Amino acid sequence: MRVAVVGGGAWGSALAHLLSERHEVLVYDRSREKVELINSGLYPADPSLRLSPKVRATARLEELFDFGEVFLVAVAAQAVREVLARFPADFSAPLINTSKGIEVETLKTLSEVVAEVLPRADYFVLSGPSFAREVVLGKPTAVVLSGKNSSLGRRLQEEFNFPRFRVYWNDDTKGVELGGALKNVVAIAVGICDGLELGLNARSALITRGLKEMAFVGELFGARRETFYGLSGLGDLVLTATGDLSRNRRFGLAVGRGVPVEKALREVGTVEGYYTVKALRRFAEEKGVELPITETVYRVLYEGLKPTEAVEVLTNREPKEE
């Protein structure tokens, strides 16, 4: 199988490295520096790590279309529409999205974005608890694949499944993609909590209540609640909220320790949860629903609420049933 990877960043190049064990792989990235690193056998996110020599890269998108049978999209969530707009209008190949987020301007999930831009594409989403660096290092990882085309999806599951990269199937596509998006907001909250040194009890409570908020939002979007208790929800949340390879967690830690938001963003890089919380806040307002963790994180990041004051906001809420 010829796998075309759109995006030569940490995750795109990690998946290319993994899949090259069994498939032909070509990576596209507009950054010639990344392309040169990949073609030199170096992992762009950390050139001290080696990539498989089977992985090739190009800065020409047309070359990718000539090559690919299956397309993996691994770019920042807010860039997905812009990147896919450069695809042929009649594109109909399998397209596997690995980006995690909600489009801020439209409040659409990425499956909805793809349906608008490339209506003939066979859409799938790959998500779950997976740090790119650990995939490159061959550490055991388990993820979830989902899509509407079950027969093709099961074939892709087999093709992408490796002894140290377990791929599970779940037919709740909306739930799988939302789990990956919503957990980033909670991960920022947990990072702020840990940055304030509030302790393990507080961290555990925040993760638990955050998961419930994620499932609640998921149901409003039409997803199944139980999906959020699997790999793409709880699994990804625990990893992103507690693992220091997580940019969302590191960003939250910096903010909790008093680093200004803009400076923390510059230091950490792309933080998907920073954009997702903005979309979620608008979604909550339009639906007229209460999302306490989302609202509090939004106020810290966009309205200047001090992290110490945010703790007071959450801990002084009216007691409720679990």
Image (cartoon, rainbow, N blue to C red):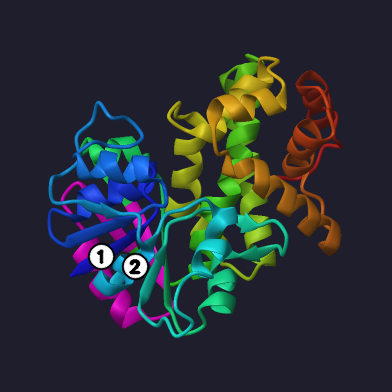
Q: Secondary structure at mark 1?
A: strand
For the question of whether residue 130 can be seen, the reply is: no
Q: Is residue 229 above or below residue 252?
A: below
Residue 219 sits in which quadrant?
A: bottom right
Q: Residues within 10 Å of mark 2 (few under 14, many from 20)?
A: many
For the question of whether residue 28 can be seen, the reply is: yes
Per the rendering, the mark at residue 97 is none
Q: Position of residue 76 (x, y in %)?
A: 52, 50
- Highlighted magenta segment, given as a residue range: 143-168
Identify residue type, mark 1. Val
Residue identified by numbered label 2:
71
Query: Which of the marked residues, 1 or 2, is nearer the chain's N terminus?
Result: 1
Q: In the depicted view, which residue is nearer to us: 134 or 45?
A: 45
Q: Secondary structure at mark 2?
A: strand
Q: Is residue 185 above or below residue 259?
A: below
Q: In the depicted view, which residue is nearer to us: 108 or 220?
A: 108
Q: Residue at x 34, y 67 (%)?
A: 71
| CB-based contact (under 8 Å), mark 1 and mark 2 | yes
State which quarter of the image contains the N terminus.
Answer: bottom left
Q: Residue at x 39, y 71 (%)?
A: 95
Residue identified by numbered label 1:
3
Q: Residue at x 78, y 31 (%)?
A: 300
Q: Position of residue 165 (x, y in %)?
A: 24, 50
Residue 149 drawn in magenta: yes
Q: Is residue 188 above or below residue 91?
A: above
Q: Residue at x 49, y 61 (%)?
A: 176
Residue 136 sits in which quadrant?
A: top left
In this rendering, position of residue 68 left or right of residue 7 = left
State which quarter of the image contains the C terminus.
Answer: top right
In this rendering, position of residue 28 left or right of residue 17 = right
How far apart marks 1 and 2 lie (CA) works out to 6 Å
Q: Position of residue 281 (x, y in %)?
A: 78, 50
